[in-house]
């Protein structure tokens, strides 16, 4: 333990204490003490003065502290339905839970154990019931890696059948995994002949009169030489079928069908593969899809200086209800009255017919616009086309690398936490050096960050006026979409940003309110929705009651709910709904104004847990081998316990830390000073000077 001040400071403190004592006892001739008492009092006063002076230098204690961290065993158990659907389903539903409970009890008696369940999500261990309809092994491995970073984890014990249908290949995560993984293979390891519908790709919403594709992916295990038939039926009538000849024991094939959207409404199509007599598992032979045939479309006109990857990235967020027409350079500008949104990408430019565009905008003075400003944008012409933002070239013609950060005061629509966290890490956009003057009321979504300096200028802003407009002062947003996919293996954050932007612009001007829900829910998933209501000043409000009616478009069944109010918005948990396509109509009364919000979503059946019912022992073994662990079966749980007890890697770890504590915060230093002062006072009192 060291005092964290140099020696010369201690000498100064001692000198001050000596000087203080000399003034009182050697320079003061009125005091008459004997030599021994004078020396004693001098020493006491020197210590008091020296300690007080030393405290002014803010000294601290530095001490080395050792702590012992006991090893932790992380136990993660698969709770997915595929385990209980296997050939050994009776064992796993009745006998296995007790076997596992006994194993847990012995584990907790010998080790410090943290327990988790995983399937659709990773959670603390509660009840083992094999009801999860999805399996994500990669998620639990990532969760353990993150939560136990630099912790003393002796081993991870993973109970699973090795089959996953969400996330990505778990073996990709374990190349440098920090903990050994012992795997316990659940389910049936024997392979049986099995036909199954693996996946179906289709458009959930199509236009009336159009032909729409349906791609069915079928598979078969141990069925070489067999024949099968895939049929598509609607209302009990076969609408398409194809015969299959299965050529191998590991068989997979994609079958394409073209169906006609000849009638408006919801179509229910049942897909079934048949062919084997006495097939043990039939749950994975059937899949049902719902397709909504709609007689309406949104049309978007994109005027661009030239083809650009940004256009494809923005178009990718649109659903089948939107049609996009592209016009480049000198091409003739069509009638804007046919469109619900105008996208200007680096337009107007030197190649744009400014007169024609200006005339079209004058005739269609309420068509909303999304303006993407780039190096080719003619700023003078753009200033003449609109009166919301005045733009001029800055001091340099060079393009700036500009990153974005979410404006916490943005209120036009809700922004997800993932977007707030990630957008600052996205690649910079190429933005011209601009001098801008915002002439109308505006709401900035993204603010500019140039070389780490937040300028306060908007990178993306929404302007409120007679015409709804949004401006993006930079190009190359296609890089954001690629980076989002690289980070998350999906483009959900990018899609959220631009789908909400386009949806806001295409809504009618008075409709600043919105209901937010997923486009698709699973049949075992809670249907949770949120909503925002805005007053005529575009401010969030929660005063009116918000009701909603949800209608199953196939059966006509209706569900009536009331949203619950939160601080700034509304929330509804509609529970679990049967599979199908649903429309909703939310209404609220605000003074003499009625707010009506419409939309739709679908609920799809979750049957993918039944697609593969044979345990993937090879994957489980590869996870353990890659991390210096071992692979076990359920019968070998006693052996697993013995191996854990004998594993020399599972041991306590001693950590050494250096701690610093300010001396002035120590209580004992106060008592030392009080004690020294009290002794001096008592001695002086005894000899009559106090």
Image (cartoon, rainbow, N blue to C red):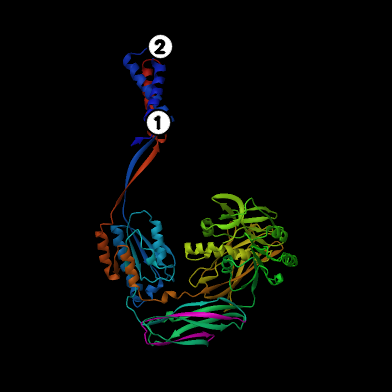
Q: x%, y% of residue 67?
A: 32, 47
Taking the magenta stretch, the answer to whether it contains residue 219 is yes
Is label 1 in a helix, a strand or a loop?
helix
The residues bearing labels 1 and 2 have C-alpha atoms spaced at a distance of 31 Å
Disc 1 target residue: 670
Classified by dominant secondary structure, the portion drawn in magenta counts as strand
Q: x%, y% of residue 75?
A: 35, 62
- The residue carrying pointer 2 sits among few (fewer than 14), some (14 to 19) or many (20 or more) residues within 10 Å by Cα, namely few
Q: Magenta span covers which residues?
A: 209-236
In the image, is residue 567 above or below residue 305?
Answer: above
In the image, is residue 552 above or below residue 127?
Answer: below
Residue 126 visible in the shown view: no
Say the numbered circle drawn on residue 29.
2
Residue 642 visible in the shown view: yes
Q: x%, y% of residue 290?
A: 54, 78
Which picture quadrant has residue 284? bottom left
Q: How many marks?
A: 2
Which picture quadrant has residue 371? bottom right
Residue 463 relative to residue 476: left or right: right
Q: Nearer the viewer, residue 235 or 564?
A: 235
């Amino acid at each position: 333990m060291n005092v964290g001040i140099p020696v010369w400071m201690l000498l100064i403190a001692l000198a001050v204490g000596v000087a203080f004592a000399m003034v009182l006892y050697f320079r003061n001739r009125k005091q008459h003490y004997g030599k021994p008492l004078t020396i004693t009092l001098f020493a006491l006063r020197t210590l008091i003065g020296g300690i007080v002076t030393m405290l002014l230098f803010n000294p601290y204690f530095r001490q080395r502290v050792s702590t012992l961290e006991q090893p932790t065993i992380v136990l993660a158990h698969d709770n997915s339905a595929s385990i209980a659907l296997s050939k050994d389903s009776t064992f796993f539903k009745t006998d296995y839970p007790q076997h596992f409970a006994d194993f847990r009890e012995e584990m907790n008696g010998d080790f410090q154990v943290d327990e988790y369940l995983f399937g659709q999500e990773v959670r603390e261990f509660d009840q083992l019931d094999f009801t999860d309809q999805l399996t994500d092994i990669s998620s639990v491995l990532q969760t353990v890696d993150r939560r136990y970073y630099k912790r003393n984890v002796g081993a991870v014990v993973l109970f699973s059948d090795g089959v996953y249908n969400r996330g990505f290949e778990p073996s990709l995560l374990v190349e440098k995994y920090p903990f050994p993984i012992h795997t316990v293979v659940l389910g049936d390891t024997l392979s049986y002949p099995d036909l199954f519908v693996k996946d179906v790709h289709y458009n959930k919403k199509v236009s009336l009169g159009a032909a729409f594709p349906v791609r069915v992916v079928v598979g078969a295990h141990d069925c070489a030489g067999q024949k099968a038939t895939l049929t598509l039926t609607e209302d009990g009538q076969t609408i398409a079928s194809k015969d299959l000849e299965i050529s191998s024991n590991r068989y997979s094939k994609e079958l394409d069908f073209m169906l006609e959207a000849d009638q408006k409404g919801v179509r229910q199509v049942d897909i079934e593969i048949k062919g084997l007599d006495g097939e043990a598992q039939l749950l994975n032979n059937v899949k049902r899809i719902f397709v909504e045939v709609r007689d309406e479309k949104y049309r978007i006109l994109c005027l661009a200086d030239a083809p650009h990857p940004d256009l494809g990235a923005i178009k990718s967020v649109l659903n089948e209800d939107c049609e996009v027409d592209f016009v480049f350079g000198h091409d003739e500008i069509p009638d804007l009255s046919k469109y619900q949104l105008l996208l200007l990408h680096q337009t107007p430019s030197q190649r744009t017919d400014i007169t024609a565009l200006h005339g079209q905008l004058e005739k269609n003075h309420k068509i909303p616009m999304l303006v993407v400003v780039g190096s080719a944008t003619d700023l003078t012409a753009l200033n003449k086309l609109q009166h919301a933002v005045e733009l001029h070239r800055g001091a340099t013609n060079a393009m700036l690398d500009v990153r974005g950060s979410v404006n916490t005061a943005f209120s036009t629509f809700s922004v997800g936490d993932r977007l707030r966290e990630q957008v600052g890490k996205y690649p910079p956009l190429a933005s011209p050096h601009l001098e801008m003057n915002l002439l109308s009321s505006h709401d900035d979504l993204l603010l500019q960050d140039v070389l780490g300096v937040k300028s306060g200028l908007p990178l993306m802003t929404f302007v409120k006026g007679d015409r709804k407009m949004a401006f993006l002062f930079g190009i190359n947003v296609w890089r954001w979409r690629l980076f989002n996919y690289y980070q998350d293996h999906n483009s959900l954050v990018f899609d959220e940003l631009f789908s909400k932007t386009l949806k806001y612009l295409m809504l009618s001007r008075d409709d600043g309110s919105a209901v937010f829900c997923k486009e698709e829910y699973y049949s075992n998933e809670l249907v949770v929705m949120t909503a925002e209501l805005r007053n005529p000043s575009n401010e969030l409000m929660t005063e009116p009651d918000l009701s909603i009616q949800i209608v199953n478009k196939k059966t006509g069944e209706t569900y009536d709910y009331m949203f619950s109010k939160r601080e700034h918005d509304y929330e509804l948990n509609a529970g679990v709904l049967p599979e199908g396509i649903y429309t909703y109509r939310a209404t609220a009364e605000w003074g003499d104004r009625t707010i009506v919000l419409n939309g739709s979503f679908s609920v799809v059946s979750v049957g993918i847990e039944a697609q593969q019912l044979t345990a993937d022992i090879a994957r489980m073994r590869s996870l353990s081998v890659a991390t210096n662990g071992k692979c076990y079966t359920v019968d070998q749980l006693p052996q697993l316990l013995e191996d854990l007890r004998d594993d020399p890697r599972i041991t306590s770890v001693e950590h050494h830390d250096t701690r610093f504590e300010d001396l002035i915060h120590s209580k004992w230093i106060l008592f030392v000073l009080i004690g020294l002062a009290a002794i001096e006072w008592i001695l002086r009192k005894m000899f009559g000077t106090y």
